[in-house]
Image (tube, grey):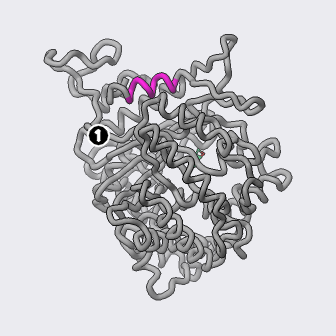
Amino acid sequence: MDRRSFIGAGIVAGGMAAGGMPRVAGAAAAPDLGFPKDFVWGCATASYQIEGAVKADGRGPTIWDTFSHTPGKTANGDTGDVACDSYHRYAEDIGLLKNLGVKAYRMSIAWSRIFPEGRGQPNQKGIDYYNRVIDGLLAAGIAPYVTMFHWDLPQALPGEWRNRDTAKAFADYAGFMAGKLSDRVHRFMTVNELRCFTDLGHMQGIHAPGLQLPAAEVNQVRHHGVLAHGLGVQAIRAHARAGTEVGIADNTSIFVPAIETPEHIAAAKKAMRDENAMFLTAIMEGAYPPEYLAAAGAAAPKVQAGDMAAIGSPLDFVALNIYTPTFVKADPSAPRGYTPLPHLPQSPRMASPWLYVGPEAAYWGVRAVSELWKPKSLFISENGTSADDVLNAAGLDDDADRIMYLRNYLGQFRRATAEGFPLHGYFLWSLMDNFEWADGYTKRFGIHYVDFATQKRTPKLSAQWYKELIRRNALV
Ligand code: PNW
């Protein structure tokens, strides 16, 4: 891969200045590497991946506690019992954010710290913890963006997401927390990555609760996922202050046209809509596309009156987690008019086997969602990469490959802002190395290195790079 031409092709009409530096104002043909004024730069984390302290202050067990403690389910039997211990070290972690100069922090709330059994009496000590974190962020000049559910489902809810009542319990919890926090938090995301917590947990069985269900039950779980989102939107609106914005953080499958011609671009957009039919398409259109229902046949989800209206509740913004692309070509001989192109054994990828490199996913994700559904506003709720991080003899992690990855993706996000798509912010995954689900601590996504034996945080070279990018509000 030729990085220079990669970036140059995506973002600069007249070629890049030496070293990729923006030239001084007024210079002829100065390439503009800047992002829009007021672009929101942030970092993201999630409760179970960083907090640890799983028994502290009345927190109830979650399906991820159960799953990670089940032998053979995670790498090395790793669990989130301690993780980054951010439950106790949150002040230090806010300091890391402040040093980067980010304007925003995307965090999630552990439902079972608030309602240890998923519903019932709230646990004030759990609420107090998030009040401390949020007040600390605000004191540091950092806006909290709060995800209500990032996979740590209270274990006490019977049947987990197989049970429709879980969607209702989620809405009750989300509304309750919006009521507690919306005096200080202005943007909420309902759920994180529908496809992951439904399919990885209930079809592949590689995430909690580790089930491999038949298609009809998987589709029902998916339906309960989008229903939870929709009921959650309504509950947050009902309990939050006026002006509070509500969205979702979704890992919509992203299709990149193999060639930038009208026919391939149309194929990519059709693939985006069709392949996300049960998730973002249903949410943005308030209906399952008839082709999806027809293809599912007897396995189609059972939908009750009012469900689709709730699922289609208008959103203030859509946030996307963007990692990996699927390339696609127009194909008149295919039933749907397109053919996704498989990754090849030698396709470039990062340290996680699923993380194929494809910066164009950044541009096409934003563009296709914008053109298909015209959301008012878009954010990138996650983008980042694992890398084979090691501390060198000087105790530093010079993670040039992570910088390579981020620089290329951000070049493509910049292309989207330059073309006027309503992308307003970016959250880098992740602030620090953390519990990477089934991969345990074997995959590191942080821009701060965490020594899990001592809990020492060390900024990687990518943290310096991100800080400089934020300072200039431009690609560096
Ligand atoms: C996301 N895949 O997960 C999650 O939101 C984060 O919690 C996670 O740490 C991060 O991305 C890095 O993995 C994903 O298999 C997990 O395509 C798996 C996939 C994508 C995203």
42 vs 389, nearest the viewer:
42
Q: Secondary structure at mark 1?
A: loop
Q: Residue at x 24, y 16 (%)?
A: 23
Q: In the figure, residue 4 lies in which quadrant?
A: top left
Decide: is 385 above or below 200: above
Q: Which residues are magenta?
A: 462-470
Q: Residue furthest bottom?
A: 305
Q: Residue furthest right?
A: 71
User: Residue 418 location in percent, x, y?
Assistant: 24, 38
Label 1 CB sits under 8 Å from any ligand 1 atom: no
- Number of other residues with Cα within 10 Å of mark 1, as a class: few under 14, some 14 to 19, many 20 or more: few
289 vs 400, nearest the viewer:
400
> How many numbered discs?
1
Q: Is residue 333 visible?
A: no
Badge 1 is on which residue?
Answer: 38
Q: Residue at x 61, y 30 (%)?
A: 387
Dominant secondary structure, magenta: helix
Q: Is residue 258 visible?
A: yes
Which quadrant, please, contains the C terminus? top left
User: Residue 185 location in percent, x, y?
Assistant: 43, 55
Q: Is residue 329 rendered magenta in the image?
A: no
User: Residue 268 location in percent, x, y?
Assistant: 37, 53
Q: Residue at x 42, y 66 (%)?
A: 240
92 vs 455, nearest the viewer:
92
Q: Is residue 467 rendered magenta in the image?
A: yes
Decide: is 454 above or below 26: below
Q: Residue at x 67, y 37 (%)?
A: 443
Q: Is residue 127 left or right of residue 403?
A: right
User: Residue 251 location in percent, x, y?
Assistant: 49, 54
Residue type pointed to by label 1: Asp
66 vs 322, nearest the viewer:
66
